[in-house]
Structures are given as C-alpha cells and as structure tokens.
Amino acid sequence: MEFIKYEEQGEVGIVTISREKALNALNSQVLDELNATFDAIDVNKIRCVVLTGAGEKSFVAGADIGEMSTLTKAEGEAFGKKGNDVFLKIENFPIPVIAAVNGFALGGGCEISMSCDIRICSDNAVFGQPEVGLGITPGFGGTQRLARLVGPGMAKQMIYTARNIKADEALRIGLVNAVYTQEELLPAALKMASGIAKNAPIAVRNCKKAINDGLELNMKDAVALEEKLFGDCFETADQRYGMEFFLDKNKEKVKEPFKNC
Ligand code: DAK
C-alpha cells in the first residue's frame, strides 16, 4: 500500500489516508487501496475502526481535482462509482467506523467522513462541499448524506453556496459530535473506539444495522426490523453473560471481555 496505512491497537483498527503532498486527496489509487484495506480487516477480531488523515493540516481535501480534470463523461461516472462503492462499504461495514477529522474535509473528504458512523474533529477542521464552484455536483453521496445528517435546508445552503464551515459551526449543526485540540483528537477517537469495542460485539453490530437500515423504512417496518435484530442477540453467549453479570450482585466480580458469540 502506498497511500493507506493500517495498524491495530487491541481490538481497534486505525486506517490512515496518507497522501500528504496532496492533502490526502482521493485519487483512484487511494480509493482502490482503501477498498482493499477495509476488505482485509478481520471483523471477528477488530470491533471498531478509526479513519483519519496523515499530517496536521488535512483529513481529506476532496477527490483529486488533477485526476478528475481530464475525465470523459464515462470515466467520470466510473470514478464516481469507484468512490461510491468504497463509501458504501464503509457505511455498511459490519462494525462501527469513527472519522477523526484532523483538518480539511472538503468535497469527497466531507463525504467520506459522512459515510462513517460517528464524526469527531480537531479545532482546525474545515468542512465543505465546494463542487458547484468546480462545475460539478457532489459525486460521492454528498447531496444525500449531508441532507440526512444536518437536514435539507442546511445541506442546500452548504452545497449551493459552496461555503466552507469551521469546526465550531460543524458542531452547531450536528455534522460532528465533538471538537478537540489537534493533539487530543486521535486519543479521543481511540478512547471512544475502545469503549465501543468493550461492549457486546453482536449487539453493537445489530444496533448499526438497525439504525442504518431502519432509517430507510417507515416506522412500522423499522421497529419490526429492530425486533428481529433484538431477537438475534438472544441465546448468544454474550447476552447470557451480560445479563447474568448484572443479576449477580457480587460487587467483587470483574466483568470479563465479551466473546463475540
Ligand atoms: N486534489 C488534488 N490536489 C489537491 C487537492 C485536491 N482536492 N487539494 C489540495 N491539493 C494539493 C494542491 O494542489 C497542492 O499541491 P502542490 O501545488 O503542492 O503540488 C497541495 O495539495 C497543497 O495544497 P495548497 O497549496 O492549495 O494548500 P493551501 O493550504 O493553500 O490550501 C485547500 C488548502 C484545501 C484550501 C486547497 O488546497 C483547496 O482548496 N483544495 C481543493 C479543495 C476542494 O475543492 N476539494 C473538493 C474537490 S471536488 C464525482 C466524484 C467525486 C466528486 C465529485 C463528483 N463524480 C464522478 C460524479 C468529488 C469532488 C470533490 O471532492
């Protein structure tokens, strides 16, 4: 891998987009490597992933404008599909993915952060969808995910004006959950990820599926989906152990790690 670094800390996987000379912009190779990296993560061992960018300036400054500038219509469509396939893979990844947004998150950078389950950012982060200023629409799901996250009115304002927003405004409109100093960001993301990794993995996965898939359904079908995923947790070793541990009033007992079965 030239542009993606992957490491593991316990049950947490850390994926770093590392193309600093272009502010981690997404070209075809970065997208291919991201795809292969997520494919190679052992989701029976790893329980949460943190996605971040290399360096102190940028998370991802968008799709690679140099590469896009010469695309034909057919090539543009193929490039859009390549990005969308990776972003959908992240969105539907069985375990949670936290975006630690450490600087510019523009265009495809904002879009990849929105395909993650949770976004936290550093105080120097800048979000935006500048595509209309380049003569294109957002092409990696921005029109769809931004509207779902911050509401259509705010999404339309950001997309039509192509105006970037800073971390404090991203927090105010609910695009990110929290803002940290640059030094605190990755430790905070890893702390959140290991907190998630300590919980019952089958239950966490089923919560992700219930929320993601349920949002596409009407309430009646959505709660039926929730019932099914709730039911699927029963008879697992983790459900039995989690409830037995609560019911056992022995205060001396230390909770054992969940076994993912
Ligand atoms: N692509 C390629 N290179 C980029 C880049 C990008 N998006 N962003 C930055 N770079 C490169 C710069 O060209 C520069 O390279 P050198 O000149 O050193 O070789 C290097 O990174 C450092 O950038 P700057 O010198 O510009 O650094 P500054 O601090 O002055 O400015 C900046 C930082 C982030 C404000 C600025 O670089 C900037 O405005 N970058 C472009 C941001 C942007 O517009 N991003 C959105 C790209 S559009 C679709 C599929 C996908 C998409 C759309 C449609 N379909 C197929 C339908 C997605 C579109 C986008 O993401």
Image (tube, helix red, strand yellow):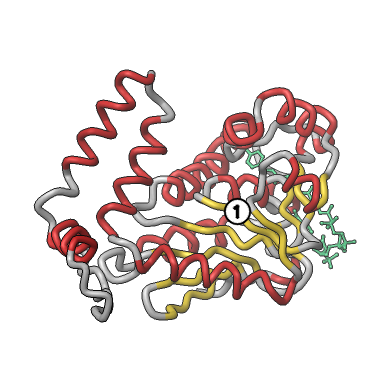
Question: Which residue ends up furthest to the left in the rendered image?
Answer: 235
The residue nearer to you, when weighing 22 against 181, is 181
Image position of 218 (left or right of 33):
left
Looking at the image, residue 149 lies above or below residue 258: above
Q: Quadrant of residue 173?
A: top right
Residue 85: image location, x then y, percent: 45, 45
Q: Could you tell me which residue is drawn at 60 percent across and 51 percent down?
A: 113
Q: Quadrant of ligand 1?
A: bottom right
The residue nearer to you, when weighing 5 against 153, is 153
* Secondary element type, mark 1: strand
Residue 238: image location, x then y, percent: 19, 61
Q: Could you tell me which residue is drawn at 67 percent across and 60 percent down?
A: 101
Image position of 153 (left or right of 186):
right
Q: Quadrant of residue 179?
A: bottom right
Label 1 residue near ligand 1, CB within 8 Å: no
Of the residues shown, which amino acid type is indicated by label 1? Arg
Q: Could you tell me which residue is drawn at 75 percent across and 62 percent down?
A: 103
Q: How many labels were placed on the picture?
A: 1
Image position of 206 (left or right of 178):
left
Image quadrant occupied by the C terminus: bottom left
Looking at the image, residue 103 lies above or below residue 182: above
Looking at the image, residue 39 lies above or below residue 84: below
Residue 188: image location, x then y, percent: 60, 70
Q: Can see residue 180?
A: yes
Q: Can see residue 261?
A: no
Crowd rating for badge 1 (residues with CA inside 10 Å; few <14, some 14–19, many 20+): many
The residue nearer to you, when weighing 76 against 231, is 231
Q: Could you tell me which residue is drawn at 46 percent across and 78 percent down?
A: 7
**Mark 1 highlights which residue?**
119
Residue 62: image location, x then y, percent: 70, 51
